[in-house]
Amino acid sequence: MKNLIKLVDEHLDKYLGICYPEEIFKAMKYTLMLPGKRLRPVMCLETVRMLGSDINKAFPMACAIEMLHVQSLIHDDLPCMDNDDFRRGKPSNHKVFGEANAVLAGDALLTFAPQLIIEKSDNLTTETVLKLIHEYTKFAGAYGLIAGQVVDIESEGGKLAKTAEETLDFIHLNKTAVLFRLAIRTGAIIANAEDKTINELDEFATKFGLAFQIYDDIMDEISTFDELGKTIGKDKNSGKLTYVSLYGLEEAKKKFSCLIEDCCDIIKKYNSEIFVEILNKLRDRILGV
Ligand code: GRG
């Protein structure tokens, strides 16, 4: 896991140089290069490896997914969204570069990511690159990440078009699970996996994404600023609809545990130490060793 994170960091740094106008490239790189967990790019690379293909084919896609993720974090922290002053243990992008540049840095990462996939994936066929771009645009836009964020914001004002349970599932699936699905699906596409395998891994990614958002909700209650690198207890204070606020801490832990067990069952036949390591780390943090 550590080796893959190091490789991801090196590629991110290499792919995104600083040129004129420097301020926007500095803003893009600032949040991107802060120490995140790099779960999504690592999962993309590990999917390629465990399906028997060469991870070197997947660095542009893996880094593009981290760029999209970082774009969503920068925009999520803006005063008009979640209004958070800290991210990855440091002041949020808009606190350092101002709101206008933070909006533009997010936009620039969102658009640079597909440019990177197209320009640097020379060892993939045009058909594969087209499939990757399709996955990227489908999950980033109003059928994915944006839909999740819109309903999340609506839910804060208590404006629910569906039941609270349905709304929460919609938010988790679209705001969080989509990026894990993107990572694992594109890894499988790069490895030329059959549809049956892609669908099975997609189910794993969806369950993992739901478990990860419950993990994030629980950590907002039980963790510290030092551990998370962002303001703690914000969900509760803003009356956000979360797994913990809707079902309570104990029920959230039970649901989290069931999802992690389902993930372990699906992934065991793929022989991946890295996926097992990620699942164990999350489980140990929430449920204790
Ligand atoms: C795609 C145009 C466009 C807009 C994005 C702002 C927004 C719309 C969506 C917000 C999505 C969001 C912030 C979801 C939260 C998901 C989540 C649990 C993030 C934390 O992920 P970690 O813990 O973070 O992996 P690190 O910093 O470790 O990478």
Image (spheres, rainbow, N blue to C red):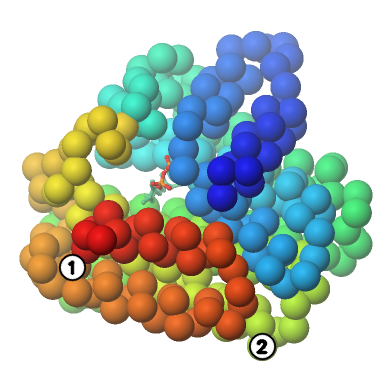
Q: Amino acid at mark 1?
A: Ala
Other-residue count near label 2 (Cα within 10 Å), few / some / many at <14 / 14–19 / ≥20 = few
Seen from the viewer's position, the closer of residues 168 and 159 is 168
Q: Give the quarter of the image for residue 214.
A: bottom left
Q: Residue at x 47, y 60 (%)?
A: 277
Q: Give the quarter of the image for residue 191.
A: bottom right
| 59 sits left or right of 281 in the view | right
Q: Residue at x 70, y 84 (%)?
A: 195
Q: Secondary structure at mark 1?
A: helix
Label 1 residue near ligand 1, CB within 8 Å: no
Residue 88 pos. (x, y %): 38, 31
Q: Residue at x 15, y 48 (%)?
A: 222
Q: Secondary structure at mark 2?
A: helix
Other-residue count near label 1 (Cα within 10 Å), few / some / many at <14 / 14–19 / ≥20 = many
Q: Badge 1 is on which residue?
A: 252
User: How far is mark 1 from mark 2, CA to CA?
Assistant: 31 Å
Seen from the viewer's position, the closer of residues 1 and 122 is 1
Q: Which mark is residue 196?
A: 2
Q: Which mark is residue 261?
A: none
